[in-house]
Image: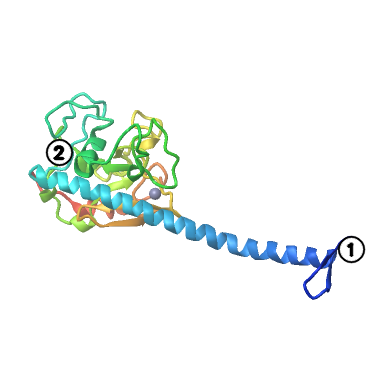
């Protein structure tokens, strides 16, 4: 008859309950050691995926710029009163960038596609958020028109797309150091840069390359009120200083 609290092995030796508990404890300890490494690997994969999204979206806006006399998409009218698509039709400001993506990639379908390209893998896709990658406001509009890429001097250092939760990223205003838009203002916190990957945000630059940029290198006044004026002047944005039109 089999003894309770013991397991017979192939060789006939029996494990006692205590031995089993020791094995289980060792497995639990190993799992505890491996889990953080697995989570890190998963986060690394997500940040690579996010960078890929940002790079591809950046490519789309550069295609647009090539086709439209070097103008970047203009985003002055986010409310939809005046944004015009490539066919000259007035469109909702909320879907304007998605229309551009659709034009060049031709694979977005609001009802069936999850719009994966438009969202960071660390975010939950919700209907009221149209993308997780915002155009740098400073390069997206000027006097209600777009801005030509040829006016920027340092394309590899000028941020074009910044990871956030909307179509524009406002909270990186280096033209008015210390006067960025207040949290809760009409611009809302969803216009701030978001750092979803170990305190880094995916940023695509005007030359088309993308990299994860540390928090301290993105001048977000709302999150970092102690940043000095000098810090703000030495930013991703200011390095791409524009020439006169
Ligand atoms: Zn991301």
For numbered disc 1, what is the local secondary structure? loop
Q: Which of 239 and 205 is in front in this view?
A: 205
From the viewer's perspective, is residue 230 above or below residue 105?
below
Q: Position of residue 128 (x, y in %)?
A: 38, 30
From the viewer's perspective, is residue 155 above or below residue 130?
below
Q: Position of residue 152 (x, y in %)?
A: 15, 51
In the image, which disc is placed on residue 146? 2
For numbered disc 2, what is the local secondary structure? loop
Question: Can residue 57 be seen at all in this image of the molecule?
Answer: yes
First-in-chain label (1 vs 2): 1
Question: Can residue 233 be seen at all in this image of the molecule?
Answer: no
Point 21% across, 35% down: residue:
75
Q: Nearer the viewer, residue 1 or 233?
A: 1
Q: Quadrant of the C terminus?
A: top left
Residue farthest toward the top in the current orientation of the protein:
81
Mark 1 sits on what residue? 2
């Amino acid at each position: 008859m089999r003894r309770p609290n013991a397991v017979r092995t192939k060789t006939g030796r029996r494990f006692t309950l205590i031995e089993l508990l020791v094995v289980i404890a060792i497995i639990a300890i190993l799992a505890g050691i491996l889990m953080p490494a697995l989570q890190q690997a998963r986060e690394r994969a997500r940040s690579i995926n996010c960078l890929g999204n940002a790079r591809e979206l950046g490519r789309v806006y550069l295609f647009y710029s090539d086709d439209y006399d070097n103008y970047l998409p203009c985003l002055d009218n986010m409310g939809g009163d005046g944004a015009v698509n490539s066919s000259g039709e007035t469109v909702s400001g909320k879907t304007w960038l998605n229309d551009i993506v659709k034009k060049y990639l031709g694979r977005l379908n609001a009802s069936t596609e999850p719009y994966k390209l438009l969202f960071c893998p660390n975010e939950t896709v919700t209907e009221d958020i149209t993308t997780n990658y915002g155009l740098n406001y400073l390069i997206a509009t000027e006097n209600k028109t777009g801005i030509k890429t040829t006016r920027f001097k340092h394309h590899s250092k000028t941020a074009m797309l910044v990871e956030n939760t909307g179509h524009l990223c406002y909270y990186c205003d280096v033209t008015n150091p210390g006067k960025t838009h207040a949290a809760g203002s009409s611009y809302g916190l969803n216009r701030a840069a978001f750092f979803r990957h170990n305190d880094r945000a995916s940023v695509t630059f005007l030359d088309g390359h993308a990299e994860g940029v540390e928090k301290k290198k993105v001048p977000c006044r709302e999150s970092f009120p102690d940043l000095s004026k000098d810090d703000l002047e030495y930013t991703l944005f200011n390095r791409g200083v524009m020439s006169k039109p």
